[in-house]
Image: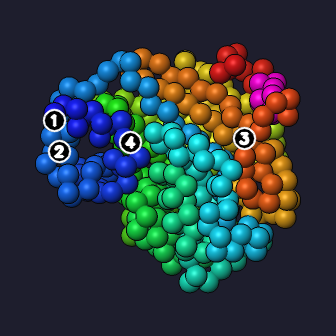
Amino acid sequence: MIKFLIQWLLTSSKYYSKNFNRLHGGFFIYSRMKTYFFLYLLISTSLQAGNFKSPDSIVSILFCGDVTLANHFENHVGNNTVYPFEKIPWFDDADLTMINLENPLTSRGSAVDKKFTFRALPVYAKMLATSGIDIVTLGNNHIYDFGSQGLFDTIDYLRKENIYYVGAGRNNSEARHPVIFFRKGLKIAFLGFYGTHKHSDSYPAQIDSAGTALRQLNLIEQDIRKIRNDVDLIIVNFHWGTEKATKPGDDQIAFAHNVIDFGADMIIGHHPHVLQGIEKYKNKIIAYSLGNFIFGGNSRPEYTTALLKTKISKNSLNAEVIPLKVTYWQPEKLEGNAGKAVVDSVKKLSQSFKKSIF
């Protein structure tokens, strides 16, 4: 009976991760509600011992691009938090789902001195949680648009909804912290980085001040090597590249290859606001840009995009492109020839690589 309950809890991954958490050894480890504390201890011990690891267990992870819930999004959606994800009810079926959250969730703070600044209603944190978002990267050029107050509020609202974050924090240590999930016997680690130095769009975290985790090779290598022997998969998020560019620069490709060589298994990129190619390098996956998912920063009412659906096990790492159509900031799966055209466009953009996921 206990074995049955343990297996059921492990496969019920959404419920398993969203009800109770604790900080242990510098990593976030996710567990059951306090009501199931005994089973939590039993499961945790078994996972640490590797008793439930199976090479046949498949973990599915969805990755989406830029999400800005401000400006035009807020004007159209208002407090109707059901609307944005209404046409993708399957979105919550994955074992894990991740987005790039490109705005603070706050009603406080003062805008920093830059051309474009975004902030979104705090209630949207609950919308993200109920839609199935498990983790966000905050390592981007808009999370500090309303200063440290905006970032602090964002962290607090995300935590309240049990959404986890990487790429930014109250100090450098927190900004660089990995988030580690247990899923079906696998330990999956996430990291996030943005910016190579301080400038008008980049506010790097320091020992005693808030900001983002710097995208510097020596720091990334340190963070990967710290956890490489303790986890099964390492996923690194980069906010990088040139806006509207459909191909990554040679420097990005070299950078990504270095990070894979350090021990990363997957790289997820964003910032260009358009889709780019997806490379396979040493049988690892590099998605250079996933474009926009729900982007309220501009007034364009309709566009096509895609998300990346990955399936991983102890012995395999696979990915596919899921085409989407977004109409007034409401995505839906794009079927038929229109959907095939989106996938074909990413396939074509991937032809410059020696090997891709196609």
Which residue is disc 2 drawn over? 39
The label nearer to you, 1 versus 4, is: 1
Task: Work out whether residue 325 or residue 145 is closer to the camera in this orientation and state it.
Answer: 325
Which residue is disc 3 drawn over? 333
Q: Amino acid at mark 4?
A: Ser
**At 85% from the left edge and 59% from the top edge, which residue is drawn?**
301
The crowd level at tag 4 (other Cα within 10 Å; few <14, some 14-19, many 20+) is: many
Tell me the element at label 1. helix
Q: Is residue 215 visible?
A: no
Rounded to the nearest whole Å, what is the CA distance between mark 2 and mark 4? Answer: 14 Å
Q: Which mark is residue 13?
A: 4
Which residue is disc 1 drawn over? 2
Q: Which mark is residue 285?
A: none
Stretch of the chain drawn in magenta = 339-348
**N-term-proximal mark, 2 vs 1:** 1
Q: Amino acid at mark 2?
A: Leu
The label nearer to you, 3 versus 1, is: 1
Position of 177 compared to 331: left or right?
left
Position of 105 compared to 291: left or right?
left
Instruction: Please identify the quarter of the rendering in which residue 208 is found.
Output: bottom left
Principal secondary structure, stretch drawn in magenta: helix
Position of 29 compared to 65: left or right?
left
Tell me the element at label 2. helix
**Marks 3 & 1, CB-CB < 8 Å contact:** no
Q: Amino acid at mark 3?
A: Lys
Rounded to the nearest whole Å, what is the CA distance between mark 4 and mark 3? Answer: 23 Å
Q: Position of residue 243 (x, y in %)?
A: 79, 50
**Marks 2 & 1, CB-CB < 8 Å contact:** yes
The answer to if 343 sits in the magenta stretch is: yes
**At 50% from the left edge and 33% from the top edge, which residue is drawn?**
60
